[in-house]
Each structure stands twice: as structure tokens, then as C-alpha cells.
Amino acid sequence: MTESRTALVTGSAGFIGFWLSRVLLDAGFEVVGLDSMSDYYDVGLKQARLDELSGRDGFVQHTAKVEDAEAVRAIFDDHRPDVVVHLAGQAGVRHSLKAPRDYVDANLVGTFNIMEGTREFGCQHLLMASTSSVYGANTEMPYREADKVDTQMSFYAATKKANEAMAHSYAHLHNIPTTMFRFFTVYGPWGRPDMAPYLFTSAILKGEAINVYNHGDMKRDFTYVADLVEAIRLLIDAVPEKDAGDSGSPVAPYRIVNIGNAAPVKLGDFIAAIEAATGKTATRNLMDIQPGDVPATWADTSLLSSLTGFTPSTPIENGVQNYVDWFRDYYGAA
């Protein structure tokens, strides 16, 4: 039931926020977007995403940082959202090695401001982005939401684990139904230019070598973006209750949900899919693993399936072909 419901989507000019905003508009939501339009990566790409949304009925965009408490409060006061999907934040494992304060500001202070908005003005359901990176040094796979997660290997992951703890406390103290998503390596059209699909595709099309870390001995649970946002849309109506008995809490209406493809793919196979989609062969520059990286990720998605009846399942070949087709169209690549 989406009639007359308003969703605040933070990070609306971002990769996932843009896709989710489209899906929610299609489902009948009024969507209030919030994005800082930071220059962490190409602002032109962010603006192009917003241009796709700006003509849609029911969409309104605000430009502000989530760490700006007054701006965030004003948006809550003006729109009184029924649902909040908090996707904004500083992303990137490698950037967190160079600029950790960015993660304190956006991921800790910014998330606190969003939680304060829901506390003061209320909402039916707060949903927030975490990451598979919180599983850190865990080696038992597939990763399950109830696994102990105390060994984060990057500061980015540490801030996301802190977000989970912060959200649980607010869910308990203020009875705010809250769902945390743990995303697994999201890719697809309109993807970020700092991520492997862009870096690989761009280099392969130009005939340049690609950097393959850990000598290619990596596996990732690549998740196609359309599958991911469909899962979020469905989870909006799976409002957690106290002591739900799954990945929830005995003292708060709170839940953690993995969103992944439940099928880890070898990095070499992902590169091969790009080669097939581009019709070109990659030259591989094999390198050591980077600090903060983990060798493998793999999501157990049984909880997502039980809550929504949906499991992401786009084959890597299809998703990569869609991405390469979009890349060629958007960037004018041969």
C-alpha cells in the first residue's frame, strides 16, 4: 500500500539512491531526495541521474549535506516522511585510508542527524545502508546476519558497524522500526566511476591494462542494482517488530538484512564477462591485495527471501552486458 506515502531518500543522486527513487516513484510514492552533490566522484554523473528524475511527478530534490543538522531537520519538518531510506554517506574502502574524517562526518554525524529527524518527527519505518564489509575478517561463509561482526578491516566498515549499533539504540530508546541493509558489491548501469566495473570496462575499451588485486584470487557476491532496489522496495513493508526472532532484537523493533546475489563470482569470471560484453581482451596487471580489502564475500539471503519472497538472481553475464551497453551509450565509448 503506497497511496499518499512519502519517502525521504538520502543519497538520491547516488547510484543506488537514483535507482531506488525511480522504483519508488513507479510504485506510487512521493519521493523527497536529499544529496550533497559532493565531488567524491564526477558531479556530472550525479546531475545526469537527477535530470532523469527531475521531470517525474512526485519527486522533489534538496541539495544539502546530511551532516548539516539544521538542513536535515528542515527537510523532515517540511515533508514529514512516512518512510526514510538513508543511503547517503561516504563510500569506498580505499578512500577511507586517505580521508578517514570524511567518514566520521558523513557516516557518523550524518546518520545521527537522520536518526534525530525520525525521533523528532516520527516515521513508519527507517531503513539504512550498511555493508558486507562489516563482516571483516570472518571466514565462515555464506555470511549470515546473526554472525558475530567484530573484526572490521577498514575504517569505512567500522563506521558502518557503528551505524548499526547507533540505529539499534534509537530503535530501542524511541521505538523507531529500523531495518539495516548489508549490501554486497552492487553494480549496473549508472554505476560509480570509482568501482571495478567502470575501471575495468573503461580500461578494456581503451586497450589499457587493468589492475587485478590479490593476483585475481578474489570472489565477490556481485549484486545487480535493479535486484537490490527491488529488495529494498519490498522490505519497506516488512516492518520489524521487537523480538521478531530472525536477525532482530529482543529489545527493539530492529532487523539486519543481507541483500546479495547469494552466488560469489571469481574476479576472473567477472572480467571475462566484461571481455565478452565488450568484445575485447583485457591485459591484466596482477597486484597484491590492498589494505582493507577482503578476499571473498558471500551473502546468505534466506532472511530476505522469507521476508519478501524475493531473491536477487540476475546472472552476471546479463548484468554486465546491461552495464557495458549503458557505459557505451553514456560515455560514447566504442
Image (spheres, helix red, strand yellow):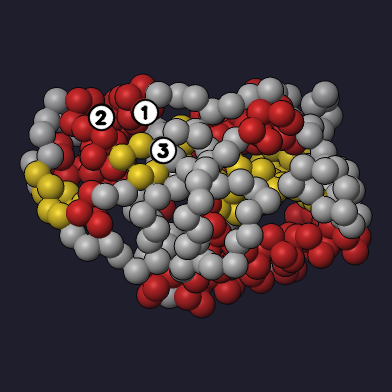
- Residue at x-position 24% and y-position 56%: 213
Q: Are marks 3 and 2 in contact (CB under 8 Å)?
A: no
> Which structural element holds mark 2?
helix
Figure quadrant of residue 134:
bottom right
The residue under label 1 is which amino acid type? Ile
Residue that badge 3 annotates: 264
Determine which of the numbered discs, if any, sits on residue 273 in the image: 2
Residue that badge 1 annotates: 316
Q: Are marks 1 and 2 in contact (CB under 8 Å)?
A: yes
Figure quadrant of residue 305:
top right
Q: Earlier in the sequence, mark 3 or mark 2?
A: 3
Image quadrant occupied by the N terminus: top right
The residues tagged by marks 3 and 1 sit, at their Cα atoms, a distance apart of 10 Å
Q: Earlier in the sequence, mark 3 or mark 1?
A: 3
Q: Earlier in the sequence, mark 1 or mark 2?
A: 2
Q: Is residue 58 visible?
A: no
Vertical side of 164 occupied by 277: above or below: above
Residue 122 location, x and y as percent? 88, 52
The residue under label 2 is which amino acid type? Ala
User: Does residue 67 appear left or right of residue 156 in this picture?
Assistant: right
